[in-house]
Image (tube, rainbow, N blue to C red):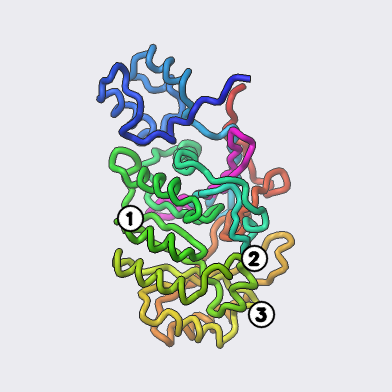
């Protein structure tokens, strides 16, 4: 069996091949890949034909053997990607009136094991490379029919804990914000974490004005450790200290993610405790209605409980909103990503398959 060619998207921009040392050829290649989103060397018509053949024989442009699209009634699209080694991962495209947003994965599965999250129930498969992370954006743009540079918001909230795949996730982010690639503003990139203090502090020193989203989900250690099995490794107090360091270094407010679970974390005293914890931290609290999935064992808080929780936070002068979950009927809402294939929604379509 012929060995798998390396993925060109894993190569840093300054290290891309250039025919016979001609740097302008490297710039042309960059433009075709990241600005125009071309997925076939043969389509790069201003490159010499012999060099296109040489590139095609040495490199892969696309890490996905198969791409399946699951459409939602709200216009969102869940993408299921089959990687060259047979592993699978997912991304979600969410169109809004004034922006195109893509939620990408940093791993196959997730090691955090949050009990209310379908991805956590899968366990950990492997880390994705920087190229495989960026490729999700390029693939979504290609299959939706627009240029990659039209994507103006990216959230690393798909499968995986991005800060446990730190080097590859950060390299992917730097590729996204590079003016020679996708030219995204760092402020339009959100990185989600379950709360890893040392990694948050390391991220604070990177000089990137990202939006940091921390999945807290409970204000007390007992509840948090019950629903997030890995939470015993880091106390809430230690996480909050790292968020203060983040704000000192970046000046950016923190997004606090809080999934509302009936009878678990939606009591009035928990709202008051959360408000107390966040005093002195510039934050915005996202209350997330629970998106059910088969076998979860949880119920979402009802509308009255969510509204009461929100009101108690606002009474303590916190910025808070209730998230509207998109893509729910396609298995693409927050906490639902679980590699649903044939058993998933009927509105599906295989839109890409590698020849051979």
Mark 2 and mark 1 lie on one chain; the one further toward the N terminus is: 2
Q: Which residues are magenta?
A: 77-102
Give the main secondary structure of the magenta stretch: strand
Which residue lies at the image location 26% right of the left edge and 25% below the top edge?
23
Which residue lies at the image location 40% right of the left edge and 40% below the top edge?
148
In reply to whether residue 29 is colored magenta, the answer given is no
Say above or below: 111 vs 47: below
Mark 2 and mark 3 lie on one chain; the one further toward the N terminus is: 2
Which of 76 and 121 lies nearest the eye of the viewer?
121
Q: Position of residue 283 (x, y in %)?
A: 39, 73
Numbered disc 3: secondary structure: loop
Q: Report how many numbered discs are placed on residues in the image.
A: 3
Quarter of image, res 53: top left
Q: Position of residue 56 (x, y in %)?
A: 46, 20
Which residue lies at the image location 60% right of the left edge and 56% below the top edge?
111
Which of 306 and 154 lies nearest the eye of the viewer?
154
Label 2, label 3: how far apart the Cα atoms are: 13 Å
Mark 1 and mark 3 lie on one chain; the one further toward the N terminus is: 1
Q: Position of residue 273 (x, y in %)?
A: 51, 84
| Quarter of the image that includes the C terminus | top right
Say whether residue 78 is visible. Answer: yes
Residue that mark 1 sits on: 206
Residue that mark 3 sits on: 263
Residue that mark 2 sits on: 116
- Disc 2 and disc 1 in contact, CB within 8 angstroms: no
- Disc 2 and disc 3 in contact, CB within 8 angstroms: no
Q: Residues within 10 Å of mark 2 (few under 14, many from 20)?
A: many
Give the left or right position of residue 285, taking residue 78 as reference. Answer: left
């Amino acid at each position: 069996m012929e060995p798998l060619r390396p993925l060109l998207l894993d190569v840093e921009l300054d290290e891309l091949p250039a025919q016979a040392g001609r740097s302008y050829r490297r710039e042309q290649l960059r433009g075709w890949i990241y600005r125009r989103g071309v997925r076939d060397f043969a389509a790069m018509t201003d490159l010499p034909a012999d060099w296109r053949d040489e590139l095609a024989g040495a490199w892969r442009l696309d890490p996905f053997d198969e791409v399946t699209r699951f459409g939602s009634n709200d216009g969102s699209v869940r993408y299921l990607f089959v990687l060259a080694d047979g592993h699978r991962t997912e991304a979600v495209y969410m169109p809004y009136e004034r922006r195109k947003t893509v939620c990408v994965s940093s791993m196959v599965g997730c090691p955090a094991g949050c009990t209310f999250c379908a991805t956590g129930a899968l366990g950990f498969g492997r880390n994705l490379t920087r190229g495989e992370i960026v490729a999700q954006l390029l693939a979504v743009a290609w299959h939706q029919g627009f240029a990659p540079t039209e994507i103006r918001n990216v959230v690393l909230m798909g499968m995986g804990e991005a800060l446990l795949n730190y080097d590859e996730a950060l390299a992917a982010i730097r590729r996204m914000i590079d003016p020679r690639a996708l030219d995204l503003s760092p402020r339009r990139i959100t990185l989600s974490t379950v709360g890893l203090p040392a990694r948050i502090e390391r991220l604070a020193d990177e000089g990137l004005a990202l939006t940091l989203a921390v999945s807290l989900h409970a204000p007390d250690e007992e509840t948090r450790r019950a629903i997030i099995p890995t939470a015993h490794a880091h106390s809430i107090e230690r996480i909050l200290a790292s968020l203060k360091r983040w704000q000192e270094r970046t000046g950016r407010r923190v997004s606090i993610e809080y999934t509302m679970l009936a009878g678990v974390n939606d009591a009035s005293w928990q709202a008051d405790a959360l408000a107390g914890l966040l005093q002195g931290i510039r934050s915005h609290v996202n209350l997330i209605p629970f998106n059910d999935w088969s076998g979860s064992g949880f119920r979402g808080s009802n509308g009255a409980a969510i509204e009461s929780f929100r009101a108690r936070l606002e009474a303590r002068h916190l910025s808070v909103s209730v998230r509207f979950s998109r893509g729910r009927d396609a298995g693409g809402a927050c906490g639902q990503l679980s590699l649903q294939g044939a058993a998933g929604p009927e509105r599906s379509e295989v839109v890409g398959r590698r020849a051979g």
